[in-house]
Image: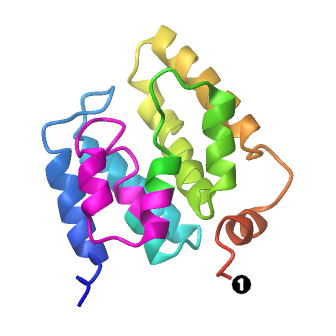
Amino acid sequence: MPMPYLNLSQVELIAREAHREQTDKAGRPYAEHLAAVAEGVRIRGGSEEQIAAAWLHDAIEDGALSRRWLDEAPLSGRVKDMVLAVTKRDGEDLFAYTGRILATPGALLIKESDLAHNADPDRLAVLEPATRTRLTEKYAQVRGLLGLDGGAGPAERRDQANPAAG
């Protein structure tokens, strides 16, 4: 009999533990970012699978968890696909990265929430001006490549990214 999938509470605990020693660019516990992204996905109407992927969205990229862990974890294929879609790969250009996000059902909503939290003025305000400028430009470029600066409204993006909804 196959092992049941991890529930959201279990995924949250795993993510918090995996990132326990990490801090963000402002020196805050990294789990605060994960919680904000997961909550952003929730309030944007994301599914439980999307919320689970939001908790894990930086785990592989940051080396907090291994790709092998993800491959073997009792998570749905959709959760794994979304985590891998939003995981930036070494040497990968932004066009390939954003193309993969757009091509993976559910991933756009996770990246939208991630970008929203990363670009939060209160978070950016504590950074050095040069870093703040560089990151603001980077986030704007990614938003543009993902079509998040105009065009489809949030509900249309959610439906596009999560065909099972609506």
Q: Is residue 120 above or below residue 103?
A: above
Does 18 sit above or below residue 166? above
- Magenta highlight range: 53-81
Magenta includes 63?
A: yes
| Residue 33 shown left or right of residue 159 in the figure | left
Q: Is residue 38 visible?
A: no
- The N terminus lies in quadrant: bottom left
The residue under label 1 is: 166
Return the residue nearer the eye: 150 or 11. Answer: 11
> In the depicted view, which residue is nearer to us: 87 or 25?
87
Which residue appears at 28% of the width and 78% of the height?
7
User: Residue 158 falls in which quadrant of the image?
Assistant: bottom right
- Residue at 34% across, 54% down: 56
Q: Position of residue 91 (x, y in %)?
A: 50, 20
Q: Position of residue 76 (x, y in %)?
A: 40, 73
The amino acid type of the residue labelled 1 equals Gly
